[in-house]
């Protein structure tokens, strides 16, 4: 998940890194930071947070399935890029919100966040013309219309890459998921983009870092 990140003050990046390093995980509070690394105007770190999970078990006496709760410490890797004004978290919106909640605890009202109003079609356009985009493997369109008739959600695997966006026409804005083959550092990888800027990178670590840097420079 990616959000815009804006600080309400002009504190140095080192200040934020120091605050996180001074708040490691504790059993008493149930959360904290680890692996805090500052490089220039960026901070990479991991949020550790205790959460309640559950699993299903069979109750032999009652002859029914029951849910039992237990607690685990989950980890969320994230990056704060002050040069580009971005907060990037690995995982879903839930993980991103956990980071924001932790920031409110130690930074209070220091940051303002904004969602990127980008849809899968926008990512396709960003990558179109780039040597990174090899092909569009699959697209899912909501409210797909064929010859004026509404037929609902439609998933297609393009047989031809030529003018594919022109072929989907007015439905392009309704693409809610796309699976793209991209070439990063000579390595072909799979990028899946869904609504709300949920990005799944099936990349090696080196290719992932290169691609994220590419996105930082090209998303507006």
Image (cartoon, rainbow, N blue to C red):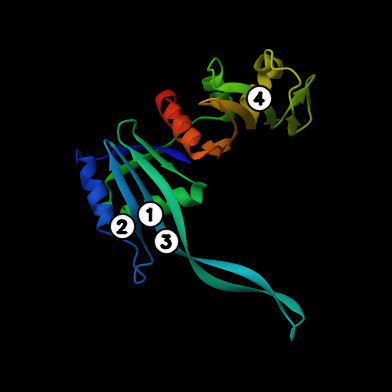
Say which residue label 2 marks. 105
The kind of secondary structure element at disc 2 is helix
* Residue 73 placement (x, y as % from top left): 46, 64
Is residue 194 positioned above or below 90 on the image? above
Are there few (<14), some (14-19), or many (20+) residues within 10 Å of tag 3? many
Question: Which of the two labelled residues, at mark 3 and mark 4, occupies the earlier sequence position?
Answer: 3
Q: Are marks 1 and 2 in contact (CB under 8 Å)?
A: yes
Circle 3 SS class: strand
Residue at 75% x, 28% y is 156
Residue at image position (25%, 40%) is 8
Residue 71: give x, y in percent of width and height.
Answer: 50, 70
**Residue indicated by mark 1:** 101
Indicate the secondary structure of the residue bearing disc 1. helix
Label 3 close to label 1 by CB (< 8 Å): no
Q: Which residue is mark 4?
A: 136
Of labels 2 and 4, earlier in sequence is 2
How many neighbours does mark 1 have within 10 angstroms: few (below 14), some (14-19), or many (20 or more)?
few
Please name which of the two marks, 2 or 4, marks the residue nearer to the observer.
Answer: 4
- Which residue corresponds to mark 3? 49
* Furthest residue in direction front, as rendered: 186
4 or 1: tag closer to the N-terminus: 1
Classify residue 193 as left or right of residue 40: right
Q: Quadrant of residue 132?
A: top right
Instruction: Decide if residue 162 is on the left or right side of residue 118.
Output: right
* Mark number displayed over residue 167: none
Question: Observer-nearest residue: 100 or 199?
Answer: 199
Answer with mark 3 or mark 1, whichever residue precedes in sequence: 3
Q: Quadrant of the C terminus?
A: top left
Badge 2 or badge 3: first in the primary sequence: 3
Q: Nearer the viewer, mark 4 or mark 1?
A: 4
How far apart marks 1 and 2 lie (CA) works out to 7 Å
């Amino acid at each position: 998940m990616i959000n815009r990140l804006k600080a309400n003050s002009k504190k140095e990046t080192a200040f934020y890194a120091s605050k996180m390093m001074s708040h490691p995980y504790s059993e008493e509070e149930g959360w904290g930071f680890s692996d805090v690394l500052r490089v220039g105007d960026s901070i990479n770190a991991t949020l550790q947070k205790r959460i309640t999970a559950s699993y299903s078990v069979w109750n032999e006496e009652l002859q029914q399935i029951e849910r039992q709760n237990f607690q685990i410490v989950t980890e969320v890797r994230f990056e704060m890029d002050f040069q580009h004004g971005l907060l990037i978290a690995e995982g879903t919106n839930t993980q991103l919100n956990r980071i924001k909640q932790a920031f409110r605890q130690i930074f209070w009202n220091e940051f303002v966040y904004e969602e990127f109003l980008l849809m899968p079609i926008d990512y396709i356009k960003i990558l179109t013309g780039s040597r990174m985009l090899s092909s569009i493997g699959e697209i899912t369109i909501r409210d797909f219309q064929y010859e004026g008739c509404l037929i609902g959600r439609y998933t297609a695997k393009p047989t031809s890459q030529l003018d594919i966006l022109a072929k989907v026409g007015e439905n392009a804005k309704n693409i809610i998921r796309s699976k793209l083959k991209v070439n990063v550092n000579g390595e072909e990888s799979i990028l899946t983009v869904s609504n709300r800027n949920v990005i799944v990178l099936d990349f090696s670590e080196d290719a992932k870092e290169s691609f994220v840097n590419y996105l930082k420079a090209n998303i507006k």
